[in-house]
Amino acid sequence: MGMKRLLAIVCVFSFSCGLHAQAVDATVCDILQNPASFNGKIVRIKGTVAASFDRFAIEDNSCGQHVNSIWLAYPEGTKGKAGATSVVELQPARNFAGTVDAAQRTPVQLDKSKDFKQFDSLLAAPFKDNSMCLGCTRYKVSATLVGRLDGVAKAGVQRDSAGKIVSWSGFGNLSAYTARLVLQSVADVTPQEIDYSKAAAATKNDVLDLTASGDPVAAAHQGAKAFGAGNAAGDQIERAAAAFGKPGEKNGVIVITKTANEVPKLEGSKGSQDSPDGVLYNCSFNSDRLLGDSMSKAIVHQGTLIASVRSPLSNTENDGLFEMEYRAWATTSFSAVATAQKTLTIYGGYIVWNNAWPVADRAKLLDEALKGALAGEGLVMQ
């Protein structure tokens, strides 16, 4: 794929039995090879967990899948601290006319042991830096995880011949993950500090402006104007900001301020609002991690993802998570240019904008950074 396209780019019985079922030992790759075969089983996985910008997952980049991770979720009501900084979760709107997956799943009760509290605290620890670093946490954590595995054969949205969304399956951000582990217990917790040293030289003199930018959606619109009329980068930022609609408009995009780390409430049921395309896009933002103008950058990123699903550009209807994330991060980097930021770093220490980059090399350096960052998150081109 070329640069141009990328940039355009239950019952009581089952409850009691489920909690005491013997766990099946499996690796991440075992599960991702055939997620549906593990659906509903209690599994035990020894793996590495990462919490980044819009990912909370057990990862193994050697699995040979387009998404080499299992989404991790706490049971509803856990109120844990760790999780993705921002997530877009799809829900059928009140007027959705397609197929609604109302699967009944055995509830999970989390053991909030000392090990869990350590696990949760480590994954919630931010990487502290003076510059803007989106989704940057200090640690990954290796651990033994036990929980209910939810699996589907295929993740993502399904469209009819006219391009209308008629159903979707999957878990996590954009329903793009074929497997999800709902955590029951955790043990053998070991932190792995993430190396941000490669970005240190470029960001050492940068300072994150902690002044709130007011309405972050309005700030995103304003950033688009900085490029002038007819500019492709400005148009992409504007498209992202427009995904959130006009002030007071109920366009199906719902902004929620919380840590995205639990099984969605009323999962599989229709929402209480209508939506132009019959889909609600529940967009969670952890405002404690999105300081200053970081929130407007998060709006641009998630707005790009929403637009990629709701109104895909020509020849991008079948894009996978790699392609959509590439486009979203590229657009977010353009918004950093618009607001005259010195640098923009993302999880893993990848710099996606540096005003010291030679003009002639900027597209190449951005491409290298995005491909490295997404490969590090286990995402592969479709």
Image (cartoon, rainbow, N blue to C red):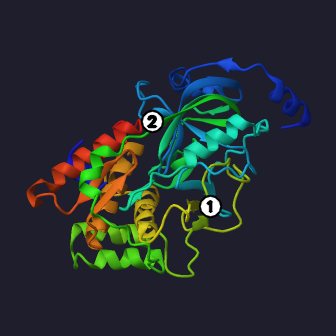
Q: Position of residue 58 (x, y in %)?
A: 54, 34
From the viewer's side, name the closer residue of 306 and 301: 301
Secondary structure beneath disc 1? loop
Residue kind at label 1, given as amino acid type: Lys
> Of callouts 2 and 1, which one flags the residue occurring earlier in the amino acid sequence?
2
What residue is shown with label 1? 258
Task: State which quarter of the image contains the N terminus.
Answer: top left
- Which quarter of the figure has residue 11? top right
- Residue at 11 percent of width and 58 percent of height: 358
Q: Position of residue 235 (x, y in %)?
A: 29, 70
Q: Position of residue 105 (x, y in %)?
A: 76, 37
- Which quarter of the figure has residue 197? top left
- Which quarter of the figure has residue 190? top right
Whether residue 382 appears in this view of the structure is no
Task: State which quarter of the image contains the C terminus.
Answer: top left
Q: Position of residue 321 (x, y in %)?
A: 42, 44
From the viewer's side, name the closer residue of 177 and 189: 189
- What number is the disc on residue 381? none
Whether residue 365 appears in this view of the structure is yes
Residue kind at label 2, given as amino acid type: Val
- Residue farthest to the right, as pictured: 12
Q: Relative to 382, does residue 42 appear above or below in the rendering?
A: above
- Residue at 43 percent of width and 61 percent of height: 307
From the viewer's side, name the closer residue of 3 and 190: 190
- What number is the disc on residue 67? 2
The CA span between labels 2 and 1 is: 25 Å
- Residue at 21 percent of width and 49 percent of height: 3
Q: Relative to 259, does residue 48 appear above or below in the rendering?
A: above
Badge 2 density bin: few <14, some 14–19, many ≥20, Cα 10 Å: many
Secondary structure beneath disc 2? loop
